[in-house]
Image (spheres, rainbow, N blue to C red):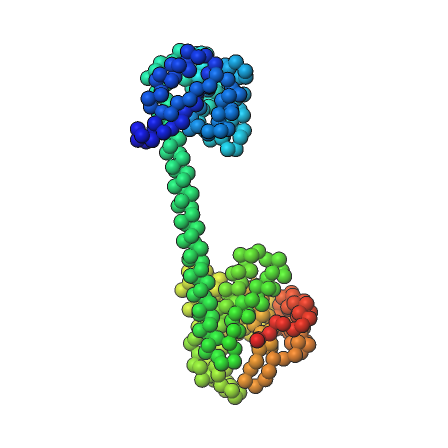
Amino acid sequence: MQMEQMRQSLVLAVDGREEDRTKLRNVLASRVNFFGVAAGSAGLAYVEQKRPDLVLLADELPDMDGFEVLRRIREDERFKDIPVIMMTMDQSQKAEAASIMAGAFEIVRKPFVPIIVVKKVEQVLELEYLHRHLRSEVRRQTHLAEERLASSQRLFEETVMALAKTIDAKDAYTRGHSQRVGRYSRHIAYKLGWTEEEQQKLYFMGLLHDIGKIGVPEAIINKPDRLTDEEYDRIKEHTVIGSEILELVAEFPELTIGARSHHERFDGTGYPDGKKGKEIPIYARIIAVADAYDAMTSKRSYRDILPQNVVRAEIAKGRNSQFDPEFADVMLQIIDEDEDYMLHER
């Protein structure tokens, strides 16, 4: 702490003995911005108005006990961190312990030894200066870290969205499919009472569930006629391709789940691993319902959007076979609440 900064420090002395206040002024006025008062009430009023950097507080005052003044300072959230040096004529160790227990930073014994007073005041102000600037630096670094985290989150979200649009662009008949599956999956999680963090995680997994189609030829994806068995096998490979791509995202390992397992069926007849029931990861079981719903409520080369009652019947039919019944029931509830049939491709 530089001398100029020390001189700007505001030090309040609260002492009923005029000669002691004079002594303090004589030894400190050239080093700090010094102000003295005679009573505890005046000291509290000054703290309220000026918030000094340090308080020198006598344990005996004409209007109240010095410890009462200290207690009131410590109880006020605005001033509880102001360092206080207690001043006492009591030479016992008990007096020092009582002062520290009450919240004093240091103790100075009377009659004053000028050099001791000066050194203790300088030490306390130096520590307070470092502490204050440490708090300021911590706040600054915390703010920077939060900004960097927010920026990274935005970059991640924008990258995922760009990938989703790239995937959908390969298929002339499923534009917006990935975004809708992400939204429907998140809505199911919301209905289940999942946390906002879990809902958002599921949304990203839904956005990227079809990323493996990047590795499937567009001629197969956009073929208007019935696929051959060989072509269908190529289509099915997108689940494995997608999980292998997303394995590279080490910070979000769950992304692979939606890509690999969204075509597993609850009865075990799905692909690529033939998992059954609760063996299928919970995220994939939700995405499977959302994916099937969007497939039926989107236009295809061979048909228009299916009527809502037909979609509802197919979801109900798939309980316990294609879909986890719990999540199928949530999707049925969402359908029933969508009285104007707003949830479909536009």
Q: Is residue 208 found left or right of 303 in the rendered image?
A: left
Image quarter of residue 139:
top left
Q: Quadrant of the C terminus?
A: bottom right
Kindly tell me whether residue 116 is visible in this rendering: no
**Which image quarter: residue 296?**
bottom right
**Relative side of 319 to 227, left or right:** right
Above/below status of 238 relative to 32: below
Of the pair 105 and 243, the residue shown nearer to us: 105
Residue positioned 56% across, 72% down in the render: 291
Q: How many marks?
A: 0
Residue sitting at the far left: 3
- Image quadrant where one finds the N terminus: top left
Residue at the image position 42 percent from the left and 28 percent from the top: 53
Residue at point 48%, 64% (across, down): 255
Q: Position of residue 301 (x, y in %)?
A: 54, 85
Q: Position of residue 19 (x, y in %)?
A: 41, 11
Would you place residue 49 above or below residue 232 in this image? above
Q: Position of residue 7 (x, y in %)?
A: 34, 27
Q: Quick one: 89 or 286, which is closer to the camera?
A: 89
Please state which of residues 14 and 201 is positioned toward the viewer in this rendering: 14
For this orientation, the residue located farthest to the bottom is 225
Residue at the (66%, 69%) spot, across then down: 338
Residue 317 lies, in percent from the top left, at 67, 75
Judge whether 105 appears above or below 212 on screen.
above
Residue 15 appears in the figure: yes
